[in-house]
Image (spheres, helix red, strand yellow):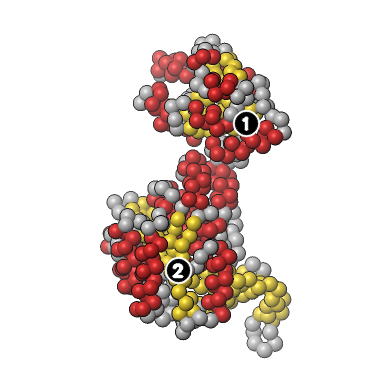
Amino acid sequence: MKRTAIEGFVERLPGIHILVVGDLMLDEYLWGTTERISPEAPVQIVDIHQEDLRLGGAGNVIHNLHSLGCQVETVSVVGGDQDGERVLALLSALQKSSDGVILQPDRKTSRKTRILASNQQMMRIDRESREAIPPAVEERLLTCCGEKLDDCQCLLLSDYGKGVLTDSLLRELIAMARAKGIPVLVDPKGKDFTKYRGATLLTPNRRELLQATDLFPMTDANLRKAGKRIVASLELEALALTRSEEGMTLFFQNGDEIDLQTRAREVFDVSGAGDTVLALLGAGLGGGLSFTEAAQAANLAAGIVVGKVGTSTVRAEEMLEEARRQLYGTDSKIQTGNCLEKIVAAARKVGKSVVFTNGCFDLLHVGHVKYLQQARQLGDLLILGLNSDASVHRLKGEKRPLIGEEERAQILAALSCVDYVTIFDEDTPLDLIAALRPDILVKGGDYTPEGVVGREQVEGYGGRVEIIRFVEGRSTTQLINRILERF
């Protein structure tokens, strides 16, 4: 996934509205130590030191979306019991309104208690009801969803098989959302996936997928066969098979497959990773990413979550940090325009002067390096605006650039004289100059001061324009011609 895509996606997260419908549960964690065997039976004794209550099931999907900064609407059912009150309290701490959560007095709210010692789960105790909600409650849920869908970019159905997502409700919700042009993503449960027919995308794990297709044993060949079969039979646009610490496989309607490897530093707990995947895929598609880009973002987030204990969430900042670590090494010099505005503001507070230059920098050569070194000497901070591939294509012709924007950005960022690099799509950096307001605007010797884009703006607020002479006989065009002549 390109740097510009993931950073742009993170910037758009606060404006993404998601509707989540599914089984709300309460996750209880009892943390302790074990050093003794019980004299009553051959079992370990766990001394509990800490207790923790979290939103589980669909609630973990909701918590993930809030951690990312998304706007979330919730529609579900809880029981009229103490655990139901606790779920509503936890939900209210995350979002302004929980008016979409219907109270069914005679229902038992699902609660899962996990006992952990030394970061390992020792036992899980389930207290729950799996009865389907009655038709009257189902109708209220459907009405509520109809009211909320128009303001959302994506519908997420988190099915834990606890009775909220009945077969008839699923059919109505999928049809309603698709009629409005809203993608529907489902985390499925049970052996019968036909109830999800017509959804946009499903996110089963390996066991769920094989159960739905009866293609055991669990081999890679069977998983791939099952993925293709489900996509075709249910008329899906795609299917994201989650493979825990092994990553994800994306199956498309046209038969294509993409394998994505998770790079978790250390795997502690895979519980809840599927919720994170559903949340990220929904936010990705709702935020304008392609299926592949959304899956890459979801896979990145899942790799972070499995390194935590218990059903956990991931923050946008963690995703950016991990993406930069994986995709761009330790280099944090490649930034978006919005991030650079904050960096420039902080630099000015301590009295630093900002130098700005821009260009295509296709096939970096000594002329470029000398030019950038001289530009850096003019101030305290050199920011380089780099033309995107699309921009270079329009300016230089259909055969350029020879090197893609990501490679060009990384090569330039490796130069000690360059403090930050930012990629822009426009033909000129005028908008970028207006946003950053550099103290010194620099261009090469083939320009006159009057012909420099942004000169009037910079000089208007007291800045200046500097022209630096190029190294004679050094240019990308000359380099290309020399290569063609010799080879």
Disc 2 element: loop
Q: Nearer the viewer, residue 222 or 383?
A: 383
Residue farthest bottom in this picture: 40
Q: Amino acid at mark 1?
A: Asp
Q: Nearer the viewer, residue 475 or 247?
A: 475
Q: Residue at x 41, y 57 (%)?
A: 152
**Looking at the picture, how far across and down is residue 106, in whole percent?**
46, 84
Q: Position of residue 180 (x, y in %)?
A: 32, 57
Q: Is residue 462 above or below residue 435?
A: above
Instruction: Point out residue 16 in the picture as x, y percentages from the top left corner.
Output: 46, 52
Determine if residue 84 is in view.
Answer: yes
Amino acid, disc 2: Gly
Would you place residue 391 above or below residue 129 in this image?
above
Quarter of the image that includes the C terminus: top left
The label on residue 100 is 2
Q: Residue at x 44, y 17 (%)?
A: 477
Q: Earlier in the sequence, mark 1 or mark 2?
A: 2
Residue 279, compared with residue 195, is above or below; it is above
Residue 211 position by quadrant: bottom left
Closer to the camera: disc 1 or disc 2?
A: 2
Q: CA distance from mark 1 to mark 2?
A: 49 Å
Question: Mark 1 — residue?
Answer: 419
User: How packed is label 1: few (under 14 Cα within 10 Å), some, or many (20 or more)?
Assistant: some
Image point (31%, 68%), residue name:
171
At mark 1, the secondary structure is loop
